[in-house]
Image (spheres, rainbow, N blue to C red):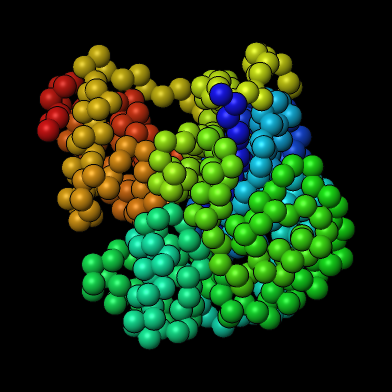
Amino acid sequence: MVERCAFVFPGQGAYLPGVLGRLAADEPLVAETLRELDAVAVRLGRAAPSRLLLDERAPALEELVREAPADLHVALFAAEMALFRLLTERHRLTPDVLLGHSFGELVALTAAGALDLADGLALVAARDDAFAAQPPPPGGMVALELSAARTAALLAGLGEWGVSVAADNSPRQCVVSGPAEDLERVRRKAEAVGVRATVLSVPYAFHHRLLAAVASEFTRRAAALHAGPTRYLLHSAILGRRVDDGDAVAELVAAHLVRPTRFTDAVRLLHAEGVEVFVECGPRGVLSGLVTATVPGVRALAPLRRRTSGPELADEIQTLTIHQFAPPPHPPRTAPASTLSPTPSPTPTPAPDDSPTHDEVVSVLRALYATALGYPPEVLTADADLEADLGVDSIKQTELFAQAVTRFGRTLPTEGTRLTSHTTLDALADLLPTLPPRPSSAPGTGARS
């Protein structure tokens, strides 16, 4: 059977500090893409994205949202386009259709060929310039563990007309946006009736009429960029249809900030048209989880769920049996070191011979996190992103992981450890056995229950 493949491009939360560091060292195409985008960014008066994408010590998502959202958006665009080029040009993986989520729609436009790389980044810059020229009223977004239809009914029942559904993400998750005070009332009322509500780390009420003046300014600025025909089939979750010419691109730009993202409907439509494989073309893996929650049984690949090397990425891609994919063997690294290549990470400390098993660590972590967070254990699946999917901030993750480290008789390095690349129970379970034993304990005396 011939399976169809969709590339999906994530939005605002798809950032991981230094996510391309190892890939840029192994893959000249990634380093080349970053060099090109660095130059474009500087011409546009923006910071070079490589500083955020190559260094694991770069600022975290929350800091960028708060202090430098324009830098974050350039980095998101650069990471997604670098991965897209690597998958299509280096690994010869040809998608049948592209689909973006919120900000990801702008990247998908560029990947589809409607804009070249420079104009795609210019479009991202024009969006931020529009916010600067027309600052919107204070607002934000809240994720609810509820379907979009039930959320709309809840908002109507509460009489909260200032808040609206901004993103229909999956059958059991949507996002609402609106004025800050109205959102806080909705959050409290939702939790009072047993609906989990998570305040998202975003600077504005995206996909809401509060941004009408910004949208008008964005449309005006974007008109200076030339949009051509697409090379790949492109479906818009905002417009609910195909985007294939300049007129459709202009309509998408005009709707981008004020109309809701109907991701659930888009995924169901693509699946009905034969798409069985979804490849997330960006860092982390938020969309992959939404896809499998919407159409169980499909395959979803998130190549940048964590920081990865060229050979590791090639191995993961080879697990797909897509008819278009015939990967060349991964060559040995022969490219000379460039200014974009980060300093190699030190080799992890080997795990002791009596290291706990992977499943054992996952089980303990699940119980520990569920108790501390008040979640049912079944919600904490091994591949759920603790921050993006479950709303656990990085400080809380570090605190809980430190407890697990102690229980297993291990110790964190004296300088501490950042968990930005270990955001799932699976990833944490891989990390924990590599940590050294506590000096005061004999190996293997840590609790395992």
Please state if 437 lies on the left or on the right of 6 as rendered: left
Please state if 292 lies on the left or on the right of 270 as rendered: left
Residue that appears at 36% across and 48% down: 386
Front residue of 379/252: it is: 252
Q: Quadrant of residue 414?
A: top left
Residue that appears at 60% across and 70% down: 259
Q: Quadrant of the C terminus?
A: top left
Residue that appears at 72% across and 70% down: 254
Please state if 48 lies on the left or on the right of 298 as rendered: right
Q: Quadrant of the N terminus?
A: top right
Residue that appears at 26% across and 34% down: 362
**Looking at the picture, does residue 65 appear above or below residue 440?**
below
Image x and y of residue 172, in percent = 37, 57
Whether residue 319 is visible here, answered yes or no, is yes
Image x and y of residue 413, in percent = 34, 35
Front residue of 158/217: it is: 158
**Looking at the picture, does residue 25 appear above or below residue 104?**
above
